[in-house]
Amino acid sequence: MRLATFFRQGTLSALLALFAFLPAFGADLDEIRHIGKIRHIGIRYANFVTGAGDGFDVDLMKGFARYIGVDYELVYSDFYSVIRDTLGKDIVNTPDGLALQGNFPVRGDVISAGFTHLPWREKFLLFSEPTFPSQVLLVAPANSRLSPIQPSGNLASDIAATKALIGTHSLLVMEKTCLDPSGYGIVGNVVDLRKLTSSTNLNEMVPAMLDGTADIALLDVPDVIRDLDQWSGQIKILGPISEPQVLATAFPKDAENLRDAFNNYLRQIKQDGTYDALVDKYYPGVRSFFSDFF
């Protein structure tokens, strides 16, 4: 009897130890409603997730939690870890292309953080309808000898003219984000490409450039809007590097019902004025950049 009891206790301990290392897999809509909470993975970036408990995407996801009738939890991550924190696997380069590998704890159910809908991410994630517009720009310190391009009325020509400004100037970029130069035909053409490695926060791009890490930098429009205010008179926009992009909320591939519920919620708040209020609260002036989107 005692031996049997010992065996059962030993087996239970072993199982508990095993489960402690298994990831808490993400869930679809029914499971999240059963659990009663949605875990929003956010990244401190521009005004999407401020780090102070608010932001465009924080308010957006709090509203979605109310819409589906569950509690809300914000889980902080960064651009290098966010997919791993959602899927429990890292994206790695293999001879056959990008692939998911490894086993890690799943820390959240949905990514909403000014997250750019990029083609390579679409292989691993479901994306919602667009939540916000964006575009990658080239910026420089205000005292740089480089001058902004003269808009031609043709975006492709303007992008080419902006890239021509880079020349041999050192360019600050951040890999695995929308500021990764590999997506814009820059890699191989820039003599002095500098990767920001001291931080995974896009908010640090302008301070690093102004501190002399590089002559010029890639930056996206939401960050530009924030930085033109924070670093007033210290930076200038030289021109566009990319076509217009869209930001969206991202879900695991097997969370289609959750994604569909979010799309319904997004359409509703765009109709009732809640969405416009969020845009005006966190990004005043953005409509002048993207009048077509809004």
Image: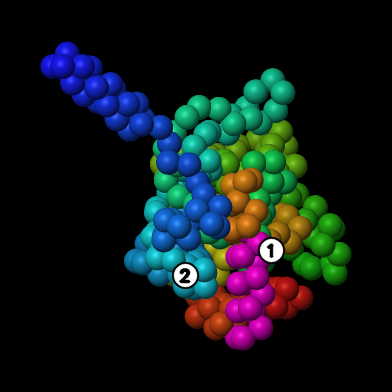
The crowding category of the residue bearing disc 1, from other C-alpha atoms within 10 Å (few below 14, some 14 to 19, many at least 20), is some
Residue 166, can we see it?
Answer: no
Residue 96, can we see it?
Answer: yes
Specify the principal SS of the magenta part: helix
Nearest to viewer (mark 1 / mark 2): 2
Q: What residue is disc 1 on?
A: 129
| Secondary element at image label 2 | loop
Q: In the rendered view of the protein, which quadrant contains the C terminus? A: bottom right
Looking at the rendering, the stretch of residues picked out in magenta corresponds to: 259-273
Q: How many marks?
A: 2
- Between 78 and 237, the one lying in front of the other is 78
Sooner in the amino-acid sequence: mark 1 or mark 2: 2
| Secondary element at image label 1 | loop
Asked if residue 227 lies left or right of residue 264, the reply is left
Q: Which mark is residue 69?
A: 2
- Between 211 and 117, the one lying in front of the other is 117
* Magenta stretch holds residue 28: no
The crowding category of the residue bearing disc 2, from other C-alpha atoms within 10 Å (few below 14, some 14 to 19, many at least 20), is some
Asked if residue 196 lies left or right of residue 120, the reply is left
- Between 256 and 282, the one lying in front of the other is 256
